[in-house]
Amino acid sequence: MTERYSIAEASRNLSRLVHEAERGKTVELTRSGASSVDLAELNLDPDELFSGIRADTQGRR
């Protein structure tokens, strides 16, 4: 089943949504209720995406 989120919802939950897409779940972003993008198609790497804001401490996984 496809999970749909508005851009505003996705911005508040981006890390979780990226992890869901990595696990094979279809996560679709919408703009004004219309389909905009499927996260799986973006091939995002959360480690790269958040590298500038994540703490450099162990225990991240």
Image: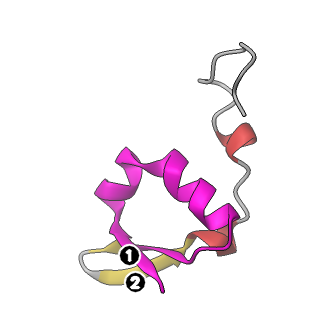
Q: Nearer the viewer, mark 2 or mark 1?
A: 1
Q: Which residues are magenta?
A: 1-29
10 Å neighbourhood of mark 1: few (<14), some, or many (≥20)? some
Tell me what residue is drawn at x 69 percent, y 62 percent: 22
Instruction: State yes or no: discs 2 and 1 in contact (Cβ < 8 Å).
Output: yes
Image coords of residue 17 (percent x, y): 51, 57
The answer to whether 39 appears left or right of 6 in the picture is right
Q: Which badge, 2 or 1, is on the more N-terminal residue?
A: 1
Image coords of residue 18 (percent x, y): 59, 56
Q: Which residue is mark 1?
A: 4
- In the rendering, which numbered label is found on residue 13? none
Tell me what residue is drawn at x 64 percent, y 16 percent: 55
10 Å neighbourhood of mark 2: few (<14), some, or many (≥20)? few
Asked if residue 23 is among those painted magenta in the image, a careful observer would answer yes
Tell me what residue is drawn at x 70 percent, y 57 percent: 44
Tell me the kind of residue under disc 2. Ser
Viewer-nearest residue: 2 or 38: 2
The answer to whether 59 appears left or right of 20 in the picture is right
* Label 2 SS: strand
Q: Which residue is mark 2?
A: 35
Q: Is residue 61 above or below residue 13?
A: above
Q: Quadrant of residue 47?
A: top right
